[in-house]
Image (spheres, rainbow, N blue to C red):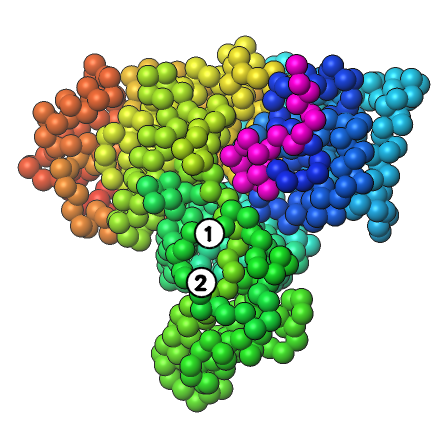
Amino acid sequence: MTDPTQRNRLDEEQSPYLQAHADNPVNWQPWDEQAIEAARESDKPIFLSIGYAACHWCHVMAEESFEDEAVAEVLNEHFVPVKVDREERPDIDSIYMSICQQVTGRGGWPLSAWLTPDGRPFYVGTYFPKEPKRGQPGFLGLLQDIKDSWNDPEERDEIENRADQWTSAIEGELEEVPDQPGEAPGTIAIENAAEAAVRGADREHGGWGRGQKFPQNTRLHILMRNVARGGRGEYQEVVTETLDAMASGGLYDHVGGGFHRYTTDRDWTVPHFEKMLYDNAEIPRAFLAGYQLTGTERYADVVTETFEFLQRELQHPDGGFYSTLDARSAVEPAGSDRGESERGAKRPESNEGESGEQEEGAFYVWTPDEIHDAVDDETAADLFCDRYGVVPGGNFENGQTVLTERTSTDELAEEYDMDAANVQGAIERARKQVFEARSERPQPARDEKILASWNGLTISALADGALVLNETYADVAADALSFVREQLWDGEEDRLQRRYKDGETKIDGYLEDYAFLARGAFDLYQATGDVDHLAFALDLARAIEERFWDDDAGTLYFTQTGGESLVARPQEVSDQSTPSSAGVAAELLLSLSHFTTHDRFEEIATRVVETHASKIDANPLQHASLTLAADRLATGSLELTLVADKAPDSWSETLAERYLPMRLLAWRPADEQTFEGWLSTLDLDDAPAIWADRTQRDGEPTVYVCRSFTCSPPRHDLSEALSWADEQLQK
């Protein structure tokens, strides 16, 4: 049998991140049984490198070390080098990131881990420079030291002992559950979470933290849910301070819409420039809620511009959404002709430009001369520069500027002695010309794999947008859902694959794939009243019960029962860059339980909350999505049964205007024959309580509102029905 480690096997993979390393002199292996068996047979440690296509420091380490012949020689001779795309294999990433954070106190990508042949870790870190630098060990020297220790019998014993200890630590962190469940937290959990959010907020610059600034969308939802119940005014202040900072700073792309991953500074100025699909789904959901809560039009504009970015830059022609845009792009050679590139042309999957030189942010940053070259009116160019802080010297590298809102249009109107509307118009015309000029630059590479989970998040955001801003977003969401169902869902086996790329599907779905996609389908039902979307959400919920629920442990695991055996079977109970899949699943099951005639979904959600009650109580912000689920369990949903073949415009206006964080929209056709067809589609013999005996009255669209097992009389005016619900809440 040929040793698979004698060559780099990543050319067989579809992941753009893995393909980018297929030409390395390192004999990279994908994570598969061939690689693991090769490590066992040769008794060599595995060097595991985990990253993703848009990761800046992954590129740096690749250029410094993985493209270096001397490094490759050591890796190939003394290790089995394995590359993993964390976006394809979040289970592997979760396991080894857990021990990295426990041992080093920090995490990040690239994640570098050295494992025994059976997968137990014994040394971990993130980015390592090739040579020692600023107190960091050099990667080449580290490889030599680990190789020597592995081959020394005494030190090998120490390695094995450490690997056992670390594996136990991983199991304790990710897999184990309490011996006894706790009592499900009441409404106090979300109140405590809001208090903690205010205490930790950066009241000067917005958001949380005193260094790098990451979006914390679920915290915003926690605060806004409390505001809706009459919570402290400070809650809303923190929300608006954070949304304003995210919308005005460098996290947001002021020319093309959409959000970067995070900023490297406290005041939201300089981002890491990668754009992730999940951010551009979850952040707009927070802005939509903020818009409903405050009426601030800027929040609606941000959502509209971000959705335009998603459709323009990240949507597959058949509807699904790609994963990421890279932080880096090619730097144009001096004197290059930008006119040959066209907007909308197929992006490269490798971001190598003609010059071969890559720079982070090159696509997004500007100098005053570049703005004046792009804009045909001098005054408009000056206004644009003043508005977005484009000055000589800049705020970024090489005298360039990351655009941020620095001067208001009212201030500019006074300074330039112009009408404010004319200032705004001139800036918008300039923005369009800057956008066109930017479209001729070498574009960042796009990772064109399509992930079920991230598409689920995007479908939810678009469905919310259809209710709040423009009903046509529901069509975009439906196209994405249809793509995922056609390409990744096996309806005969109720099985979801995680990844689609160029006609190939791969990897059994994780809990986040099922939960996020089910929430997306359910949210789309709430936006459209299309029973097929509800039926799909219920199919996915049943699959969650079958594949991820462990009745003995009382928890939902991240990986499927009977799936690949790793050193631990992780749970995902804390929020990271995406919401906790266990939290989303629990809250979703509570919502979907209204559309069943059994109580299994509610029982599962209740037990998940009870199992993790101690974690919610101890740190509700770290477990923000579980905290939201616990709150829905304690408070109950605001049930709105909407009986109509066509909803009145007044209903749509009310749903768009009112911030109702606990609302559950249960559309029902007025025609009884159509309703019987719905029950057949859902495989129900009887109507669930949310629909039972709730028929159209007086031949007009009718709404029923229920909260905590108390229901309003049937009404025709949705606003009046909601007023009844408000009165009940105040009792």
Q: Quadrant of residue 419?
A: bottom left
Residue 157 located left or right of residue 484 = right
Q: Residues within 10 Å of mark 2 (few under 14, many from 20)?
A: few
Q: At numbered mark 1, what does the secondary structure look like: helix, strand or loop? A: loop
> Is-magenta flag for residue 710?
no
The reply to whether residue 223 is visible in this rendering is no
Quarter assignment of residue 573: top right
Residue at the spot of label 1 = 347
User: What range is drawn magenta here?
Assistant: 1-21
Asked if residue 704 lies left or right of residue 122, the reply is: left
Callout 2 amino acid? Ser
Residue 16 percent coordinates (x, y): 54, 40
Q: Nearer the viewer, residue 69 or 297?
A: 69
Q: Where on the picture, by quarter, is residue 12?
A: top right
What is the x, y in percent for residue 290? 43, 53
Image coordinates of residue 717 in percent, x first then y, are 18, 45
How many tags in the picture? 2
Q: Residue at x 45, y 85 (%)?
A: 379
652 to the left or right of 417: left
- Mark 1 to mark 2: distance in Å? 10 Å
Q: Which mark is residue 393?
A: none
Helix, strand, or loop for circle 2? Answer: loop
Q: Please tell me whether residue 659 is drawn above or below residue 586 in the rendered image.
A: below
Residue 465 in the image: above or below residue 702: below
Task: Out of 346 and 253, give the one closest to the viewer.
Answer: 346
Q: Determine if the magenta segment contains residue 3.
A: yes
Q: Which residue is mark 2?
A: 341
- Quarter holding the N terminus? top right
As shown in the figure, which amino acid type bears the numbered disc 1? Arg
Q: What residue appears at the point 65 percent right and 32 percent down from the top-left corner?
A: 8
Q: Residue at x 62, y 26 (%)?
A: 31
Farthest residue to the top: give it: 552
